[in-house]
Amino acid sequence: MENKLPVYETDYNRNNKRKKSMFKPYWNDILRDQWDKVCVSERKWLKHSGSNSEKRKLKDSYCTERKQFDRMNRKFKRRYQNNERQKLEDKLYSSNQRDFWRSIGKVGICNERKSCIPNAVVNEDGTIETDKVNVLDRWKEDFRQLFNSDENNDETIPQSVESQNVHRDITELNEPITREEVITAVTRAKVRKATGIDDIPAEVLKNDTAIELLYQIISGCFQLGKVPLEWTRGIINPILKPNADDERIPLNYRGITLISVPCKIYCIILNQRLSK
């Protein structure tokens, strides 16, 4: 039989099917070697078909290797956490605070946020819906009802405000938008922020050529009373509320809408005029 079929020798020290996940930032060769020993000892214990006394010895050997791995895992984890704390402390007292907050954003709940919505929703009758089309329709309908309320907002206006009959000269509000207003708004626009549906970041607008083009667009929008279609659309980024008990319910998320950066600049100009 050995002359006809190839014989393969298995290296139990390396080629085991069950491997420890490598996503841990403190994972190293020492932990990997010890985990291999744990897998080998566990396999020998579970596959042993001899006497009970020998099987108990193999089980004790597995428990010993596993305890040793747990101790080493805690040791390297504490060492990694202490080093990260020291790095954060050094950045906290450095002149560049941006590096500190960038490092903060990589730890804690910010690092646990999912980049997509769950693949299931809970219906009103308690059943679970997993069909992709139905799940997306449920998210669309829930947020559509949330942002298009049928309530009469006039009823919520306090009588003290409604009774005021103030006449003001709003001629300045209708004056053409100036280039200086656009420059001021572009300067105030925050950089390194999420973009809208047009993928235009604030960084690319902070130059003379882009400012001139933006000035022409905003001036035309103000005179015509219309804005580009992309400015009326936004990307809703759902963020799970802190006290939410089920991530499969769409309204357990807080919808953060990302709008176009040029639209934000236009809004900054209008808001600045209204606040004067």
Image: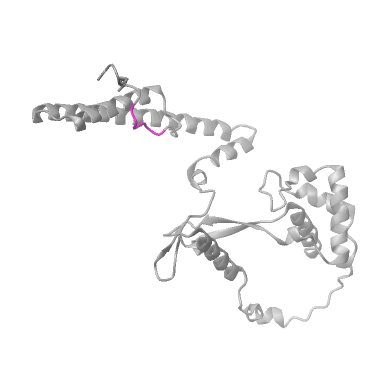
Left or right of residue 186: residue 6: left
| Residue 68 image point, x, y percent | 27, 27
Q: Residue at x 88, y 48 (%)?
A: 212
Q: Quadrant of the N terminus?
A: top left
User: Is residue 112 positioned above or below 125 on the image?
Assistant: above
Q: Nearer the viewer, residue 51 or 171?
A: 51
- Quadrant occupied by the C terminus: bottom right
Residue 39 vs residue 156: left or right?
left
Q: Which residues are magenta?
A: 16-21
- 198 over 40 or under it: above or below: below
Residue 48 sits in which quadrant? top left
Q: Position of residue 255 (x, y in %)?
A: 58, 59
Examine the rendered structure and indicate whether residue 115 appears above or below residue 47: below
Q: Is residue 146 above or below residue 243?
A: below
Snapshot colouring: one colour
Q: Is 183 in front, or is 246?
A: 246
Name, please, the residue furthest toward the top. 3
Provide residue 231's location: percent of width, then percent of height.
74, 59
Lateral position of residue 102 relative to residue 60, left or right? right
Q: Could you say which quadrant of the image residue 205 lies in? A: top right
Residue 220 picture quarter: bottom right
Specify the principal SS of the magenta part.
loop
Question: Where residue 173 sits in the image (x, y, percent)?
Answer: 85, 66
The structure residue drawn at horizontal position 70% and vertical position 78%, both measured from the top left corner, is 161
Judge left or right: residue 212 versus residue 7: right
Task: Find out whether residue 194 is within the magenta segment.
Answer: no
Residue at 76%, 59% (x, y): give it. Answer: 267
Q: How many marks?
A: 0
Indicate yes or no whether the magenta region holds residue 20: yes
